[in-house]
Image (cartoon, rainbow, N blue to C red):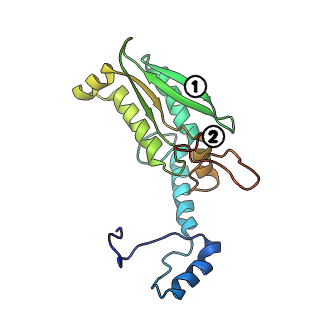
Amino acid sequence: ETARKVGDRFDIVVAPHKLADFTETLEADYIPHQVIDENVQNAFDQERTRITNKRAKGTFDWSDYHTLEEIHAWLDKLASEHSEVELLDAGRSHQNRTLKGVKLSYGEGRPGVFIEGGIHAREWISPATVTYILNELVNSEDAQVRALAEEFDWYVFPSVNPDGYAYTFQVNRLWRKTRKPYGPFCYGADPNRNWD
């Protein structure tokens, strides 16, 4: 549940090395609190293990989140199996990862629709949603979806922050930004607003 007014209960995640200071601040202001889970990372690790075990089976579906490599492999497979799907390379990330997408087109001269996902690295639902939409546009037998798919040229990029997205699988599940260094102590920018 989400707090909707002053006095409502809510949950907050605090980094382990900040917990003592945070608790001290709450107590100084007589704010009641309770530590619910002392190791949130454990839940992330369990999720990662479950996903890794499922991936070993080689399936791509929308019941779990997929790594960047799996998404790119799925795009490759989609393009190899469907002549109306063309692979696109929009350039390279700071860590030299491909900004891979596809163009879905059933003919020339149609208006274009651009769909991007994965701007914020930790928001795994975004690339999953984009790949789901693309899968529906390519494979759905629903007449309304078919009409929509064929009315436009679709430019689809599931993960436009590939470095950050990969980092959330490999190092820090809650990482949000890109991975480009900006000085010795600052990594990344928020790619939906920091373009310099």
Q: Position of residue 85 (x, y in %)?
A: 45, 21
Considering depth in this image, is 168 or 74 the residue closer to the camera? 168
The quadrant holding residue 100 is: top right
The residue sitting at 37% across, 26% down in the picture is 138
Tell me if label 2 and label 1 are in contact, CB under 8 Å. Answer: no
| Residue occupying the far front of the picture | 196
The quadrant holding residue 70 is: top right
Quadrant where the image shows the C terminus = top right
Residue 53, which numbered label?
Answer: none
Q: Position of residue 72 (x, y in %)?
A: 55, 33
Q: Position of residue 74 (x, y in %)?
A: 50, 32
Give the crowd class for mark 2: few <14, some 14-19, many >=20 residues within 10 Å: few
Q: Is residue 96 left or right of residue 165?
A: right
In the rendered image, the vertical position of residue 124 relative to residue 152, given as above or below: below
Which tag, 2 or 1, sits closer to the chain's start?
Answer: 1
| Residue occupying the far right of the picture | 184
Give the crowd class for mark 1: few <14, some 14-19, many >=20 residues within 10 Å: few
Secondary structure of residue under mark 1: strand
In the rendered image, the vertical position of residue 174 relative to residue 57, given as above or below: below
Whether residue 142 appears in this view of the structure is: no
The residue labelled by disc 1 is 89
The residue sitting at 53% across, 51% down in the picture is 122
What is the three-letter code of the residue carrying label 1? Asp
What is the three-letter code of the residue carrying label 2? Asp
The residue labelled by disc 2 is 196
The residue sitting at 48% across, 25% down in the picture is 102
Whether residue 76 appears in this view of the structure is: yes
Query: Distance from label 2 to label 1 (Cα)?
Result: 22 Å
In the rendered image, the vertical position of residue 69 relative to residue 170, given as above or below: above
Secondary structure of residue under mark 2: loop
Q: Position of residue 172 (x, y in %)?
A: 61, 56
